[in-house]
Image (cartoon, rainbow, N blue to C red):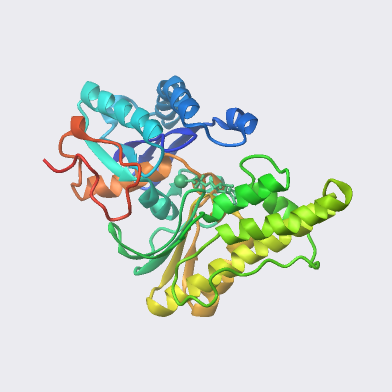
């Protein structure tokens, strides 16, 4: 099936075309320069920028795929979770196009998109950073690590999900962004923190590992942010600023603590749920140290581990929405009345998209 995917859940305007799980095009109109000035996403500006960019982004996705409207089988759009006023832009555009071109609509959960991103394939093998996975041996444990979510999800099969652990406060990517900001590393800081951590050394700096006594697969990252503040302030107090080596050492210790916390909680999830594989998605899945830790963990449990074929598919993108939409369309899960589709800012995996009940 040929599916056009649209995602305007947060800060980037994204459109993509897939043929089943093969990505024919994956276009992203980044709003990053705006938010670098503001140090974070401003919802009002996100909406405005989505409105300005959405037509051109969709047109480019179709052009790069070499696909015309009559060939498209369905439109898949992110219904949630995300910023309400940003989601609305993509949904309104999908509704308009569905009507104009007489296409059915599929309402996709953004987190299901991240979860299924490991099943996407490139059109040409050289586009892949690593081996692609034609299929996953279910049941699997999805490790969803992004700027808004940190979840362990037991996947019995496509469309059959159970959240077995999640963050009680900040998401893992959010913690990278907040600690990165304290270190003066800009926004978003995840990839820069990783880069700095590479130059970091084992120092006196030690972060406490959160929730060690709690017997659950839930995570908590906000304590690490507070710990970072306690570590950074006295270091700054002596000279008024941090040296590059101090920044690197804090980044190293912080990243290490995040990874220990994530893997300890994932172990709990794996010991209580028998699975054959890990499926890792979300912006933080681009982090090499995280990948190495998850690969080692999977190896110790004798299970496989899957990552998206390119880092572009870890961060927000519309190809994952189109792939998820394709699986839904194949099983006839179209949205009944496109005009009634509403934005679902707090949508959870497995929840019915609001507006779908007639
Ligand atoms: O999945 P994503 O693009 O957006 C959400 O749905 O949230 O994830 C963005 C998050 C940001 O917090 C960003 O700092 C983080 O992923 N991130 C990273 C890395 N690359 C992006 N965190 C750690 N290491 C990275 N290399
Ligand atoms: Zn996301």
Query: Which residue is rendered at x = 45% and y = 35% of the image?
Result: 25
Location of residue 274 in the rendering, given as x and y in whole percent from the top left corner: 37, 77
Q: Position of residue 276 (x, y in %)?
A: 40, 73
| Quadrant that contains the C terminus | top left
Relative side of 136 to 29, left or right: left
- Residue placed at 49% from the left, 26% from the top? 45
Q: Residue furthest left?
A: 358
Q: Is residue 335 above or below residue 116?
A: above
Q: Is residue 131 left or right of residue 160?
A: right
**Is residue 163 or residue 206 the one in the foreground?**
206
Q: Is residue 127 above or below residue 32?
A: below
Q: Quadrant of residue 294?
A: bottom right
Q: Is residue 354 left or right of residue 122?
A: left
Q: Is residue 69 above or below residue 350?
A: above
* Residue closer to the observer: 104 or 77: 77
Q: Residue furthest right?
A: 239
Name the residue at 43% across, 79% down: 271
Q: Number of numbered discs present?
A: 0
Q: Quadrant of the N terminus?
A: top left
In which quarter of the view is residue 260 placed? bottom right
Residue 60 x %, y %: 45, 25
Q: Position of residue 39 (x, y in %)?
A: 62, 36
Residue 129 seen in the current view = no
Residue 195, visible in the rendered structure? yes
Horizontal side of 320 relative to 244 (left or right) equals: left
């Amino acid at each position: 099936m040929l599916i056009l995917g649209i995602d305007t859940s947060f800060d980037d305007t994204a459109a993509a075309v897939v043929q089943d799980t093969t990505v024919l095009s994956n276009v992203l109109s980044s709003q990053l320069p705006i938010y670098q000035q503001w140090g974070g996403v401003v919802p009002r500006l996100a909406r405005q920028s989505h409105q300005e960019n959405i037509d051109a982004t969709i047109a480019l996705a179709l052009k790069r795929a070499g696909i015309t409207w009559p060939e498209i089988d369905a439109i898949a759009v992110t219904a949630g979770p995300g910023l309400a006023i940003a989601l609305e832009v993509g949904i309104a555009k999908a509704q308009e196009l569905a009507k104009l071109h007489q296409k059915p609509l599929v309402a996709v959960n953004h987190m299901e998109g991240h979860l299924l991103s490991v099943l996407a394939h490139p059109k040409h093998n050289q586009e892949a950073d690593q081996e692609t996975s034609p299929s996953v041996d279910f049941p699997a444990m999805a490790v969803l690590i992004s700027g808004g979510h940190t979840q362990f999800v037991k996947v019995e099969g496509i469309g059959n999900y159970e959240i077995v652990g999640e963050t009680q406060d900040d998401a893992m990517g959010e913690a990278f962004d907040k600690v990165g900001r304290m270190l003066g590393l800009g926004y978003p800081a995840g990839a820069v923190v990783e880069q700095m951590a590479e130059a970091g050394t084992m120092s006196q700096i030690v972060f406490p590992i959160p929730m060690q006594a709690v017997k659950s697969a839930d995570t908590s990252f906000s304590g690490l942010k507070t710990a970072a503040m306690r570590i950074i302030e006295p270091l700054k107090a002596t000279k008024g600023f941090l040296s590059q080596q101090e920044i690197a050492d804090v980044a190293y210790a912080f990243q290490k603590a995040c990874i220990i916390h994530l893997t300890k909680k994932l172990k709990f999830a794996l010991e209580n749920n028998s699975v054959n594989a890990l499926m890792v998605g979300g912006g933080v899945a681009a982090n090499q140290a995280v990948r190495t830790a998850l690969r080692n963990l999977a190896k110790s449990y004798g299970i496989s581990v899957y990552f998206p074929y390119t880092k572009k598919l870890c961060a927000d993108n519309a190809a994952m929405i189109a792939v998820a939409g394709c699986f839904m369309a194949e099983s006839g899960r179209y949205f009944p009345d496109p005009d009634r589709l509403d934005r679902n800012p707090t949508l959870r995996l497995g929840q019915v998209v609001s507006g779908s009940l007639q």
